[in-house]
């Protein structure tokens, strides 16, 4: 089982290949934002990797990160576009608390959406 460490929160065992955004919500129990419901549109599901950043990336993540000017920030990734298939350590940098939003967003589906086309970062 991959281990997910969230700085300041703890370390958690996560089912293999679970979406990172759902692991942050379910296993880590944090108020991770995912305003677009995990569809690579909003970028509110962003996290900052400390260790274990995946090399592979969905084309959808690559495209929205470039469009929003996020691509140049080291370690900044979209948790809705990442599967927990190895140990990872992240900082939760986009949480509901303090935003004034009504909720974190519709729960993302179990599988990555849109259907992933894999490339590298
Ligand atoms: S981009 Fe919206 S939840 Fe990931």
Image (spheres, rainbow, N blue to C red):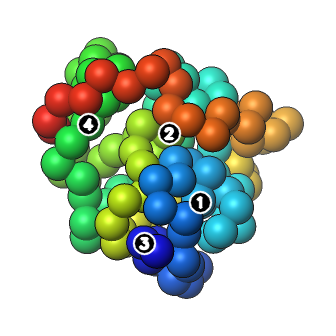
The label nearer to you, 3 versus 2, is 3
Label 3 crowding class (10 Å Cα cut-off): few <14, some 14-19, many 20+? some
Point out the tag, 1 or 3, that comes first from the N-terminus: 3
Q: Secondary structure at mark 2?
A: helix
On the image, which quarter does residue 38 sit in? top right
- Vertical side of 94 occupied by 30: above or below: below
Q: CA distance from mark 4 to mark 1?
A: 18 Å
Dot 3 or dot 2: first in sequence order is 3
Q: Is residue 73 above or below residue 89?
A: above
Query: Residue at position x 51%, y 82% from top?
Result: 11
Tell me residue 32's x, y (percent): 63, 52
Mark-to-mark CA distance, 3 and 2: 17 Å
Kindly identify which numbered label has been placed on residue 86.
Answer: none
- Disc 2 target residue: 80
- Cβ(mark 2) to ligand 1 < 8 Å? yes
Judge by depth and name the residue closer to the eye, 19 or 97: 19
Which one is nearer the viewer's eye here, 42 or 24? Answer: 24
Q: Residues within 10 Å of mark 2 (few under 14, many from 20)?
A: many
Q: CA distance from mark 2 to mark 4?
A: 11 Å
- Image point (37%, 59%), residue name: 85
Q: Which residue is mark 4?
A: 57
Front-lying residue, 118 or 89: 118
Residue holding disc 3: 2
Residue identified by numbered label 1: 24
Q: From the top left corner, tell me how far across and down residue 53 is, in percent.
A: 25, 58
Query: How far across and how far down the image is residue 120, in percent?
Result: 14, 36
Q: Secondary structure at mark 1?
A: helix
Q: CA distance from mark 1 to mark 3?
A: 13 Å
Residue 2 horizontal side relative to residue 15, left or right: left
């Amino acid at each position: 089982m991959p281990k997910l460490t969230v700085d300041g929160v703890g370390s958690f065992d996560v089912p293999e290949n679970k979406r990172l955004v759902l692991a942050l919500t379910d296993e880590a129990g944090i108020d991770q934002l995912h305003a677009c419901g995990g569809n690579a549109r909003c970028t509110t599901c962003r996290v900052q990797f400390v260790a274990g950043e995946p090399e592979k990336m969905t084309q959808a993540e690559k495209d929205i990160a470039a469009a929003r000017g996020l691509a140049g920030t080291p370690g900044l990734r979209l948790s809705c576009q990442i599967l927990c298939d190895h140990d990872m350590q992240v900082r939760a940098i986009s949480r509901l608390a303090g935003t004034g939003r009504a909720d974190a967003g519709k729960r993302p589906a179990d599988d990555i959406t849109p259907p992933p086309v894999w490339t590298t970062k």
